[in-house]
Every structure is written in structure tokens, then in C-alpha cells.
Image (cartoon, rainbow, N blue to C red):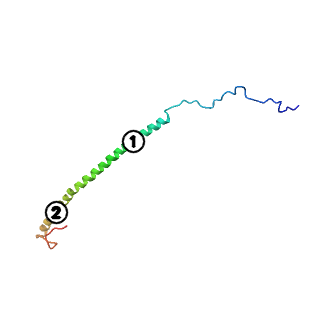
């Protein structure tokens, strides 16, 4: 005789359910929370940017000081160049007089012009 659907015993879970299956790995947590790492990195970056800003200000101040020192030295350097040109001019005049025996004139006046 053929079993009918009503007379078949159905396979059911045991009363109280099956035992739980361990599928997670029980690895101990190592290190700090990620928020602590984030706070530490933010603090280090803030300190670094602060030091960079101080260094940039110091660099700008040194560049400004260098520029102003050069500006203040220009008249001194120009006067030194002028004295050297006059010294060379008089040395050339002296050399001409020694070689030619007389003072020669290139221009029609004695006025010195650059």
C-alpha cells in the first residue's frame, strides 16, 4: 500500500531547537578604538600645520629683512662704483699724459659726463 501524505511522519527540528553553530571567530580585540587613532592623527597634523605656519612667517620676515638691507645698501654700493669710475678716469688721464706727453681732449669742453 502506498503511503498517503497525511500518514507520513514529517521531519521536524527537535523540541527546543538545534544547538547554535559557532561561525564567528573569537579573536581578542587589539589596539585602541579607531576614534583614538583619528584624534591622535588630527592632533599631530594640527601641531605640524602650526609649526609650518610659524616657519613660513619667519621665512617671510627674513626675506623682508634681506630686501630692506639691500635697499639701504644701494646708495653705498653706488657711491663705491662712482668712486671707482672716477679713480679709473684719473688713472687713464695720467697714463695718457705719460704716453703722449700732453693732455689730450676728446670733447670740446672739460666737463666730465657719463
User: Crowding near pointer 2: few (<14 within 10 Å), some, many (20+)?
Assistant: few
Residue 102, given in percent of the width and then of the height, sits at 11, 70
Quadrant of residue 110 within the rendered picture: bottom left
Residue 40, given in percent of the width and then of the height, sits at 44, 37
Residue plotted at (34% across, 44% down): 54
Front one among 16 and 61: 16
**Residue 7 appears left or right of 24:** right
- Quadrant location of the N terminus in the rendered image: top right
Residue 72, given in percent of the width and then of the height, sits at 23, 54
Residue, disc 1: 48
- Quadrant location of the C terminus in the rendered image: bottom left
User: Crowding near pointer 1: few (<14 within 10 Å), some, many (20+)?
Assistant: few
Residue plotted at (50% across, 34% down): 33
Quadrant of residue 15 within the rendered picture: top right
Residue extending furthest toward the front: 6
Which of the numbered marks, if any, corresponds to residue 86?
Answer: 2
| First-in-chain label (1 vs 2) | 1
Front one among 10 and 31: 10
Residue plotted at (37% across, 44% down): 52
Residue extending furthest toward the right: 1
Using the image, determine if residue 101 lies above or below residue 87. Answer: below
Amino acid at each position: 500500500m502506498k503511503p498517503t501524505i497525511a500518514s507520513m511522519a514529517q521531519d521536524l527540528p527537535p523540541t527546543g531547537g538545534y544547538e547554535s553553530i559557532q561561525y564567528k571567530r573569537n579573536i581578542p580585540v587589539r589596539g585602541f578604538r579607531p576614534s583614538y587613532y583619528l584624534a591622535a592623527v588630527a592632533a599631530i597634523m594640527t601641531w605640524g600645520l602650526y609649526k609650518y605656519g610659524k616657519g613660513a612667517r619667519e621665512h617671510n620676515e627674513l626675506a623682508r629683512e634681506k630686501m630692506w638691507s639691500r635697499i639701504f645698501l644701494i646708495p653705498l654700493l653706488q657711491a663705491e662704483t662712482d668712486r671707482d669710475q672716477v679713480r679709473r678716469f684719473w688713472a687713464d688721464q695720467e697714463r695718457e699724459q705719460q704716453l703722449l706727453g700732453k693732455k689730450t681732449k676728446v670733447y670740446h669742453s672739460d666737463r666730465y659726463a657719463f
